[in-house]
Image: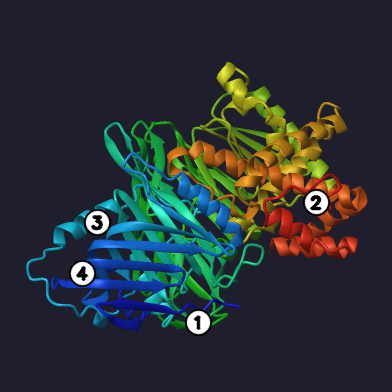
């Protein structure tokens, strides 16, 4: 059932319900002050599970294109937020208690009672979007000038890096959220409060209109080379009307993509994306994810290259109004599209898309939204891609190779996916291509070194795992598979039809540093091959369900170790032991579906370790306990049944539970409630 949350605001003894954003806001606008400040006292704003109180201060209307959309205030006040979502409570506490920055420490007052966790803190100023204009009825503050404070507020709440799609997939810029709600969801609450607590910046949002979440986040400030950088810091997350395991349905499906990318030697490139979408509900504005900037690691920490959308047209070639900002692309269809209507868009994009500040000839377009994409549960597209690069560079991606050629002095690659995929990735670089043939299967290895022997070994090992999984699970989905070298260390990824491995896999154990990352390379390759099943054939609808990718692929990689170097069960037992150690470390910190929300901007390495321990440790450890409980025969029936019943479909944790129950005739709800959604670890035997 959807949560319908009553929102109310009290300002200067006035009482009213919070209003939805005004209808018809433009897709792009700038927030400004009206310039008519008023005194406020006893201001109380309640919405969802949050309450803001300002004892005294000055406030002004906030305008968007001549329309009031909220208030900005300075004064003495307090803010209180409560999490009642059980999987979030432990994570909220952990994130909050570890969210200090060089700019200050957030002064929380924690309140625990009746299965909820609240946090209260003082505030000094804030932007509150969602307050009706009529509520600002105090006496005029004729001597007040809030313009400078408002400008400083905007600087304080800027973000220098894109918000991670896994860390906060619900995140939208406040302007984009208001515009979307105004056009697509009239009457639905869309409230945002940016609040300063000392030197700490808090962001509260209630979004019934778009992502259906209530959340509290912060901005982490750090310094590098005397420069100030602002990072996103999640604190608390509560879904509205859905839950991990049963995510909400997508608003539309992306059905087909035709990409054409032409690159210049300078790195400048033009990208055309022709996309076919089918909405599941009536909509006037189509929301897409598209990076506003490309961020790459360089000498000055992270550096950015802007991405510019130059035009959006429909199937008839008519220009459509659009707005691109904060990694969202909002397209006004010019009318209200009906459910199940087929919509075709052509999006033209330009920029220095081949961007690497370290001047390494390695340009990657991986699972980030480098071309227009829906939310994760809406990625279900066939694809064709044509990539033209200068002769010094070679393009590499998964998919069936239609043609490689040299045309007009440029290298050209044409590929296609004729089955639905998600997370399409592309690499461009000075690659050496090596092809290995195994029966009807072709494995192409793209490396930066003339490592013929190493490339052959990697291809041979990948093929062995492909054959193994074909016997255990289902036939491998692709006759053509690509392995590509990435200029990184300790890294692997598996977009459709493709495996990405970092340098040490290709260059051997050259020194102690490289040896550290090379340890466990066989299992890493087995893990990435397994992703063609878990995350490839079976698709994950949300970041909360990522264990269906990672834990299941990790489990298969552990099973594969039985067949490497003839070590048998002893190798598998060693892997299970590592899963158990990681599970014991991370289990008390939060449940598996919140693995991506345990995130400390001040210590991203520690955050990554916790995420790894939950998804790659506790997740496969739960699967092992299930196997012990039901036996090998039913366990592999269950694993095969998942592949058969959900081939080329989205799958959820509830689906996993139901298939287990169908195979075994046992009730697994208590198991998942206690060990997946909860913090406990199952004993041997999995009861």
The reply to whether dot 3 and dot 1 touch (C-beta < 8 Å) is no
Q: Dot 2: few (<14), some (14–19), or many (≥20) neighbours within 10 Å?
A: some
The answer to whether one can see residue 438 in this image is: no
Estimate the x, y position of residue 642 in percent, counting from the top left: 79, 59
Q: Dot 1: few (<14), some (14–19), or many (≥20) neighbours within 10 Å?
A: some
Tell me the tag on residue 590: none
**In this rendering, which labeled residue sits more in front, label 3 or label 1?**
3
Q: CA distance from mark 2 to mark 1?
A: 39 Å
Please give the residue where the numbered disc 1 appears in the rendered image.
Answer: 282
Residue 402 as seen in the image, left or right of residue 666 = left
Tell me the tag on residue 59: 4
Tell me the tag on residue 475: 2
Please give the residue where the numbered disc 3 appears in the rendered image.
Answer: 153
User: What residue is rendered at 43% in x and 78% in y?
Assistant: 184
Mark nearer the N terminus (3 vs 1): 3
Residue 374 as seen in the image, left or right of residue 100 = right
């Amino acid at each position: 059932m959807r949560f319908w949350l009553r929102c109310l605001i009290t300002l200067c003894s006035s009482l009213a319900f919070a209003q939805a954003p005004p209808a018809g806001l433009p897709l792009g606008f700038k927030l400004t002050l009206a310039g008519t400040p008023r005194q406020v006292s006893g201001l109380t704003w309640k919405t969802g599970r949050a309450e803001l109180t300002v004892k005294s201060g000055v406030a002004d209307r906030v305008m968007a294109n001549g329309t009031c959309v909220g208030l900005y205030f300075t004064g003495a006040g307090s803010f209180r937020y409560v999490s009642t979502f059980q999987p979030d409570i432990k994570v909220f506490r952990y994130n909050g208690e570890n969210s200090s920055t060089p700019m200050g420490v957030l002064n929380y007052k924690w309140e625990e009672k009746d299965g909820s966790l609240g946090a209260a803190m003082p505030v000094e100023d804030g932007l509150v979007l969602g307050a009706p204009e009529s509520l600002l009825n105090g006496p005029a503050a004729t001597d007040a000038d809030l313009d400078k404070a408002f400008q400083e507020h905007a600087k304080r709440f800027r973000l220098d890096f894109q918000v991670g799609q896994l860390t906060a997939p619900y995140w939208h810029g406040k302007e984009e959220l208001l515009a979307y709600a105004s056009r697509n969801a009239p009457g639905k609450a869309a409230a945002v409060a940016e609040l300063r607590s000392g030197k700490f910046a808090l962001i509260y949002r209630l979004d019934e209109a778009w992502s259906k979440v209530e959340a509290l986040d912060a901005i982490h400030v750090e310094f590098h080379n005397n420069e100030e950088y602002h990072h996103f810091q999640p604190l608390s997350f509560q879904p509205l009307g859905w839950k991990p395991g049963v995510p909400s349905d997508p608003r539309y499906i992306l059905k087909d993509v035709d990409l054409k990318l032409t690159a210049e030697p300078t790195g400048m490139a033009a990208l055309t994306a022709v996309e076919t979408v089918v909405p599941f509900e009536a909509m006037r504005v189509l929301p897409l994810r598209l990076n506003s900037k490309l961020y790459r690691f360089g000498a000055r920490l992270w550096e950015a290259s802007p991405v510019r959308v130059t035009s959006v047209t429909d199937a008839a070639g008519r220009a459509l109004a659009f707005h691109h900002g904060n990694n969202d692309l909002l397209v006004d269809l010019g009318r209200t599209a009906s459910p199940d209507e087929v919509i075709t868009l052509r999006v033209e994009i330009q920029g220095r898309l081949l961007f690497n500040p370290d001047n390494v000839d390695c340009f990657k377009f991986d699972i980030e939204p480098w071309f227009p994409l829906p939310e994760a549960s809406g990625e279900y597209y066939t694809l064709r891609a044509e990539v033209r690069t200068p002769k010094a560079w070679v393009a590499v991606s998964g998919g069936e190779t239609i043609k490689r050629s040299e045309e007009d002095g440029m290298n050209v690659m044409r590929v296609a996916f004729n089955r639905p995929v998600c997370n399409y990735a592309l690499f461009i670089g000075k690659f050496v291509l090596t092809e290995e043939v195994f029966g009807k299967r072709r494995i192409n290895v793209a490396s930066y070194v003339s490592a013929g022997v190493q490339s052959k070994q990697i291809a041979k090992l990948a093929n062995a795992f492909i054959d193994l999984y074909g016997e255990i699970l289902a036939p491998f989905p692709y006759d053509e598979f690509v392995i590509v070298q990435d200029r990184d260390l300790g890294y692997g990824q598996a977009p459709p039809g493709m495996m990405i491995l970092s340098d040490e896999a290709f260059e051997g154990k050259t020194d102690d540093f490289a040896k550290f990352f090379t340890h466990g390379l066989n299992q890493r390759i087995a893990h990435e091959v397994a992703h063609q099943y878990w995350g490839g054939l079976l698709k994950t609808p949300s970041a909360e369900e990522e264990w269906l990718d990672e834990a299941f692929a990790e489990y298969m990689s552990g099973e594969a170790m039985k067949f490497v170097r003839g070590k048998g069960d002893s190798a598998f037992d060693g892997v299970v032991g590592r899963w158990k150690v990681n599970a014991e470390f991370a289990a008390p910190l939060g449940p598996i579906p919140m693995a991506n929300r345990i995130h400390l901007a001040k210590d991203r390495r520690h955050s990554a370790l916790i995420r790894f321990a939950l998804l790659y440790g506790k997740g496969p450890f739960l699967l092992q306990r299930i196997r012990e409980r039901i036996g090998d025969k039913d366990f592999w029936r269950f694993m095969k049944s998942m592949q058969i019943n959900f081939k080329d479909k989205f799958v959820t944790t509830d689906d996993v539970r139901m298939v287990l129950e169908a195979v075994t005739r046992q009730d697994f709800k208590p198991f998942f409630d206690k060990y997946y959604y909860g913090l406990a670890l199952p004993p041997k035997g999995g009861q």
